[in-house]
């Protein structure tokens, strides 16, 4: 779905609610992280980043796994440790996942969602399109990335000019666009765009794996809403940039 130059809409739009959103497949991936069923509880997937730089581990321990892989891993651990997940509270399950280094980082979440989005909308496997490194620059990483692409896709990779382009006019944003912090340390994904009666942008719904400061608790996958004026202010202040995959 695209916006014309004056804020009108092109594409399949929900006329009653005036919104543009990601595909059903992408929405299903989002919900799988926001509403993980573990035991008889529903929790949002914890945030986890591989700060130690481990490379050889399974992606479920690298902050890059699907929600199903995370769920299966914690269930296996619980079985081995004779832990009854059904008797645990949501917070206890969350802390158990954190203690076992199970969760998703911001770029891992975005890649899983966009993989589903582009597969449904364009029949494109973005994992085969994303440039990670050239074989002559880093032969070993290139070789590994061919077999383990998700584990090697970072915010910096998503922001690379080979993979995405800047959206200069915020009035032309689309569901699926990236909001990237100038530090290249965090990425958010535009999930839905809501329009007012004049078909100009009113607000945007965003999904991301939320980073927290060391003294804060509860880092997890989260949905937030920005007014369009808030988004433009962050862009004008140089805090964030908008980018869109080229595929």
Image: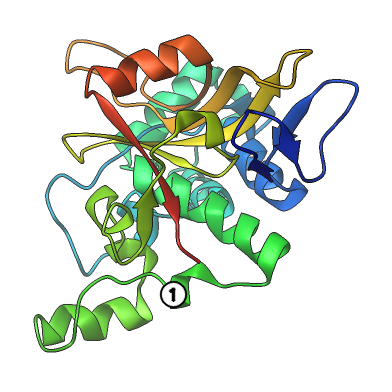
Q: Which residue lies furthest to the right in this view?
A: 16
Check the image and report above or below for 41 versus 82: above
Residue 58 in view here: no
| 166, 119: nearer the viewer | 166
Q: Where is residue 28 in the image (x, y as percent from the top left)?
A: 70, 45
Residue 73 visible in this rendered orientation of the protein? yes
- Kindly indicate the quadrant of the structure image that contains residue 237: top left
Identify the residue at horizontal 44%, vertical 34% (top origin). Answer: 169
Q: Residue drawn 64% across and 39% down?
A: 4
Nearer to us in this view, 78 or 220: 220
Task: Please provide percent x and percent y for residue 24.
Answer: 76, 47
Q: How many labels does the image show?
A: 1
Element type where label 1 sits in the image: loop
Outermost residue toward the front in this view: 6
What residue sits right under mark 1 in the picture?
129
Sort mark 1 into few (<14), some (14-19) or many (20+) by Cα contacts within 10 Å.
Answer: few
Nearest the viewer among 66 and 11 is: 11
Colour mode?
rainbow
The residue positioned 40% from the left and 18% from the top of the image is 232
Q: Give percent across and percent down for residue 7.
A: 64, 28
Q: From what the image shows, is residue 47 above or below residue 122?
A: above
Identity of the residue drawn at 66% across and 36% down: 31
**Quarter occupied by residue 36:** top right
Image side of residue 147 versus residue 227, left or right: left
Q: Left or right: 89 with respect to 129?
A: right
In this rendering, the answer to whether 27 lies above or below 244 is above
Q: What x and y, as percent, mark residue 15?
A: 88, 27
Horizontal arrangement in the rendering, residue 24 relative to residue 36 (left or right): right
């Amino acid at each position: 779905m695209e916006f014309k130059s004056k804020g009108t809409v092109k594409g399949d739009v929900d006329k009653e609610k005036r919104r543009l959103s990601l595909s059903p497949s992408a929405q299903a991936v989002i919900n799988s992280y926001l509403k993980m069923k573990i035991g008889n509880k529903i929790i949002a997937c914890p945030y986890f980043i591989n700060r130690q730089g481990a490379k050889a581990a399974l992606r479920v321990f690298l902050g890059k796994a699907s929600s199903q892989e995370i769920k299966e891993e914690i269930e296996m651990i619980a079985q081995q440790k004779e832990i009854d997940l059904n008797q645990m509270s949501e917070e206890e399950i969350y802390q158990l996942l954190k203690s076992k280094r199970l969760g998703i980082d911001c770029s891992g979440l975005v890649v899983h969602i966009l993989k589903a989005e582009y597969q449904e909308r364009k029949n494109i496997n973005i994992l085969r399109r994303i440039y990670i490194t050239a074989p002559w620059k880093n032969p070993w990483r290139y070789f590994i990335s061919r077999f383990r692409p998700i584990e090697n896709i970072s915010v910096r990779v998503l922001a690379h000019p080979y993979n995405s382009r800047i959206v200069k006019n915020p009035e032309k944003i689309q569901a699926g666009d990236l909001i990237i912090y100038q530090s290249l340390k965090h990425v958010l994904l535009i999930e839905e765009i809501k329009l007012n009666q004049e078909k100009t942008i009113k607000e945007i719904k965003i999904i991301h794996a939320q980073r927290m400061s060391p003294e804060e608790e509860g880092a997890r996958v989260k949905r937030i809403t920005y007014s369009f004026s808030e988004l433009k202010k962050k862009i004008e202040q140089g805090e964030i940039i908008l980018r869109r995959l080229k595929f």
